[in-house]
Amino acid sequence: MEAACLASIAIFAGVLATLYGLDWNKNRKQNRRLARNVEEEDHNTKEPLVEQLA
């Protein structure tokens, strides 16, 4: 009985760790995409200023 309870707790902990890991990975990829978009926007906004000054 104790072994079954410990096994259930271990499985539950493993599932939680997996879900957390998947969510962390998804958020990391999304944040990297957002950072790239911000860099592209910064780059695009700087070009017209350079052209205006030239």
Image (cartoon, rainbow, N blue to C red):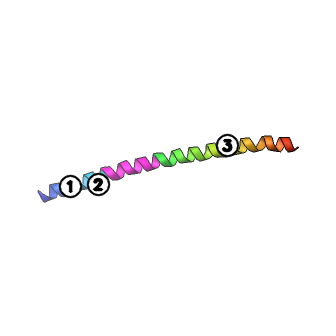
**Residue of label 3:** 40
Which one is closest to the eye, mark 3 or mark 2?
3
Side of 37 where 7 appears, left or right: left
Residue shown at 25% from the left, 56% from the top: 10
| Circle 3: element type | helix
Q: Nearer the viewer, residue 8 or 45?
A: 45
Which one is closest to the eye, mark 3 or mark 1?
3
Residue shown at 48% from the left, 47% from the top: 27
Q: Position of residue 18 (x, y in %)?
A: 36, 50
| Spatial CA span between label 3 and label 1 | 50 Å
Q: Which residues are magenta?
A: 15-25
Q: Position of residue 26 (x, y in %)?
A: 46, 45
Side of 7 where 36 appears, left or right: right
**Residue of label 1:** 7
Side of 34 where 25 appears, left or right: left
Q: Nearer the viewer, residue 22 or 53?
A: 53
Q: Quadrant of the C terminus?
A: top right
| Circle 2: element type | helix
The three-letter code of the residue at mark 2 reads: Ala
The three-letter code of the residue at mark 1 reads: Ala
Bin the neighbour count of mark 3 within 10 Å (Cα to Cα): few under 14, some 14-19, many 20 and up. few
**Residue of label 2:** 13
Q: Position of residue 8 (x, y in %)?
A: 21, 53
Which label's residue is closer to the chain start, 2 or 1? 1
Bin the neighbour count of mark 2 within 10 Å (Cα to Cα): few under 14, some 14-19, many 20 and up. few
Q: Nearer the viewer, residue 38 or 28?
A: 38
In magenta segment, residue 22: yes
Residue shown at 44% from the left, 50% from the top: 24
Picture quadrant of residue 48: top right
Q: Are marks 3 and 1 in contact (CB under 8 Å)?
A: no
